[in-house]
Amino acid sequence: MMVLIIRGARQKSNALNAGITVLRWRRKMKALILNGSARGQKGVTGTLVEAITRGLMEAKAGVQTFEIQSLTISPCRACLTCMHKTPGECSIEDDMGLIYEACKTSDLLILATPLYVDTMTAQLKTVMDRSIACMQPFLVKDVAGRIRHPFTWRMPSSFLLLSTSGFPEQENFLPLIATFRAQAANFSSQAIGEICISGSIALQMEPELLKRHLTLLEEAGRHLGATGNIPEDILQNLNTPPVGVDRYLQATAKYEQWCRSKLNI
Ligand SMILES: Cc1cc2nc3c(=O)[nH]c(=O)nc-3n(C[C@H](O)[C@H](O)[C@H](O)COP(=O)(O)O)c2cc1C
């Protein structure tokens, strides 16, 4: 199975010119991963994405990953051309076109984002805003009886959240989880789970602390690829912080030392 990672417009056109196309999957599922980290593959989010990708690929799922940071994607201008003039098509011509195409043909959307000021990164939020291009202007009741827009084309039917945070407490993810669930509902997609791995400052100081979670992520990816879901016990284990607060402070003491040496204090 092949993964097409699109990092930037130049690489994108090279890849397309070279005739690399996203594969057709005869098998179960096509996963689309949007990595919203400002550090792309180099960050902790990138490490988590790699682990779940390994599992998905072992299960023979198709995986397409976009590093949003290295694409050119402008914010929504609220011109509503996509609703009123050219249904389903955004008027802005930029790399979002690649993501629209991938959304239309994927079964699962993995929103991978570090926690930035208690929610998703601006990079990922920009993509989600631009995704309203799939909506019609009309107003109807959704399955939950709420007033929402019907669709010109559909976003992937399942959404999964994959996140990490600098601080160690799990409750820091609550605003992000609320946003993620609301977004999935707005696109009439199913939120199949949230994977929130806290304490990244410690995890970067002592990467071995993340090992167990990476193994679990691979396992989660295998289940996802095979069944479209992750068993509840694996989700629970993944959402158990890799380190308690005391261990976190022990590991981050090295970071503090490094900061002090940089600041000469
Ligand atoms: C602009 C910014 C805002 C952040 N806000 C939070 C926050 O609200 N809570 C938290 O626990 N960590 C926060 N962090 C820390 C990141 O979540 C953490 O460093 C994460 O590992 C970054 O992801 P990356 O490793 O993929 O770059 C923030 C980091 C940045 C750069």
Image (cartoon, helix red, strand yellow):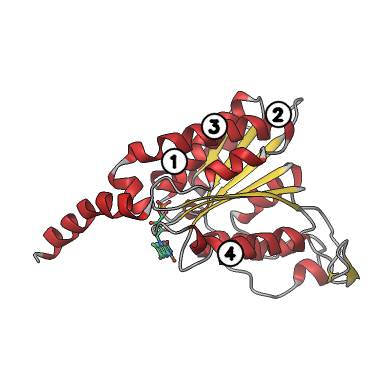
Q: Which residue: 88% across, 61% down? A: 143
Q: Amino acid at mark 2?
A: Ala
Q: Amino acid at mark 1?
A: Thr
Query: Tag 4: Cα neighbours inside 10 Å, few (<14), some, or many (≥20)?
Result: some
In what element is the residue under mark 1? helix
Q: CA distance from mark 4 to mark 1?
A: 22 Å
Q: Which residue is mark 2?
A: 226
Q: Which residue is mark 3?
A: 218
The residue lying furthest to the left in this view is 264
Cβ–Cβ under 8 Å for marks 4 and 3? no
Q: Quadrant of ligand 1?
A: bottom left
Cβ–Cβ under 8 Å for marks 4 and 2? no
The one nearer the camera, 104 or 199, is 199
- Relative to 237, 28 lies left or right: right
Q: Which residue is mark 1?
A: 47
The one nearer the camera, 57 or 71, is 57
Q: Position of residue 107 (x, y in %)?
A: 74, 41
Mark 4 vs mark 1: give the one in front. 1
